[in-house]
Image (spheres, helix red, strand yellow):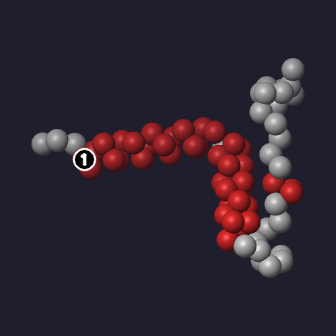
């Protein structure tokens, strides 16, 4: 069913960031570093859904204002 904090944990599995070592801890390729940053960014967005939606809305409004027709 899921915990009160995450109702969707049965649908969305927990992130696997522990399996990706942080960059700089060993010799890593660009792909490994990119994968680390991708997981970090996904976790940030997942931990702050309201801020993510607010930022996306603000960006949409700003871009709409910049390209609006006169």
Q: Is residue 55 left or right of residue 25?
A: left
From the image, which quarter does the C terminus lie in? Answer: top left
Answer above or below: position of 31 versus 19: below
Pick whichever, 70 or 19, lies toward us: 19
Total numbered labels placed on residues in the image: 1
- At horizontal 68% and vertical 49% (from top left) the residue drawn is 42
Element type where label 1 sits in the image: helix
Report the residue marked by disc 1: 67
- At horizontal 80% and vertical 79% (from top left) the residue drawn is 27
Quadrant position of residue 36: bottom right
Q: Measured from the top left, where is residue 21 in percent x and y?
A: 83, 65
Q: Measured from the top left, where is residue 48 in percent x and y?
A: 66, 43
Q: Measured from the top left, where is residue 30 in percent x and y?
A: 67, 71
- At horizontal 67% and vertical 56% (from top left) the residue drawn is 38
Residue extending furthest toward the left: 70
- At horizontal 83% and vertical 41% (from top left) the residue drawn is 14
Answer above or below: position of 43 versus 11: below
Pick whichever, 60 or 5, lies toward us: 60
From the image, which quarter does the N terminus lie in? Answer: top right
- For label 1, the crowd category at 10 Å Cα-Cα, with few meaning under 14, some 14 to 19 and many 20 or more, is few
Can residue 55 be seen in this snapshot?
yes
Answer above or below: position of 35 versus 28: above
Q: Is residue 10 left or right of residue 66?
A: right
Q: Measured from the top left, where is residue 10 in percent x and y?
A: 84, 27
Answer above or below: position of 28 versus 35: below
Can residue 6 be seen in this snapshot?
no
């Amino acid at each position: 069913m899921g915990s009160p904090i995450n109702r969707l944990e049965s649908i969305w599995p927990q992130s696997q960031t522990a399996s990706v070592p942080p960059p700089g801890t060993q010799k890593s390729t660009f792909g490994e570093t990119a994968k680390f940053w991708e997981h970090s960014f996904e976790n940030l967005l997942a931990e702050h859904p309201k801020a993510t939606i607010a930022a996306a809305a603000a960006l949409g409004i700003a871009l709409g204002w910049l390209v609006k027709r006169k």
